[in-house]
Image (cartoon, rainbow, N blue to C red):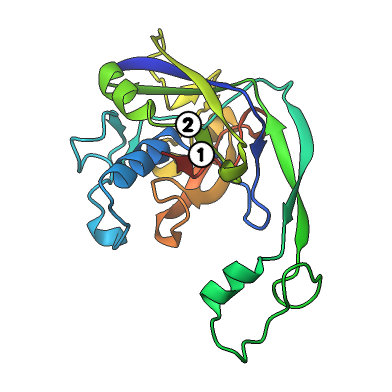
Amino acid sequence: MEPLRITFDMITPVALPLKKQPYPMHLDSLVIGILTGIKKEIFENIHKDKYAPGQNPDIPLAVSGEKSPIYCASVAMTSKDIQRGQYGITKKPPTDEEMRMYRPQENATYKQAGEGSGIHRAWMEEVQTVFPHQIIFECQGDKQALWDILTNVRRVGVFRRVGMGEVINMHIESIDNPQAGLVYNNQPARMLPVVDWPEGEQKQWHKIAAGVRAPYWHPANREICWAPPVDTTIPNFSVVDL
């Protein structure tokens, strides 16, 4: 294991979710998401999570902490001068052929193709986007193993099906940071459990209740932790396209 910096070069903006609360994506959730996708696995039980820190040798990341172990893997970071905007998404009404496939009954209650009313009407949404030219992670891990896993990433964020969040290139380099994936510029580089990082009080880090391990959406993984500064993190890269 060695301190590493992983950089994704982006070619299209990243779309943020319409209804979910923004939450920064951790590198360990990205790695675990790819591995479970490749192995066709699903999350079943938080108490028998084989991808928990220290439980799976397939995760090429170092583990830190005694009372509340976490992976040494940062959140997605970028510079402060990212471009923000909006992207319009339009869903068209289904065609006659599509409707016959889903509702073949003669008395099916739906409008024919081209009509703008009913439950199958066309709709348009505007989603918030951010365009970081580079997305940066820091971690402590196995360089070759991480390369083999992360080369599967083609897009990140939501609305990947329409080309949002496309990754054009990836770089992994060794760095001189003994706390890589944990601390960056004297601030938390990821959600750090307060029980293992009491020095956060003296350093006046920002304290919140949030997930500290993947799956980060699960309520059982929430605890009091120190949060990274929001002005340098990209929220909600919680899904990937394999």
Task: Report the label total.
Answer: 2
Q: Which mark is residue 56?
A: none
x then y, percent, for residue 185 = 55, 18
Residue 162 seen from this side: yes
Q: Amino acid at mark 2?
A: Arg
x then y, percent, for residue 56 = 20, 41
Q: Quadrant of residue 112?
A: bottom right
Q: Is residue 200 left or right of residue 144?
A: right
Q: Is residue 88 left or right of residue 204?
A: right
x then y, percent, for residue 15 = 66, 41
In the rendered image, the residue lying farthest to the right is 116
Q: Residue at x 47, y 55 (%)?
A: 217
Front residue (pair 105, 137): 105
Q: Residue at x 52, y 73 (%)?
A: 101
From what the image shows, is residue 61 above or below residue 33? above
Rounded to the nearest angstrom, the CA distance separating label 2 from label 1 is: 16 Å
Query: Where does label 2 land, which residue?
Result: 154
Q: Which mark is residue 25?
A: 1
* Screen quadrant of the N terminus: top left
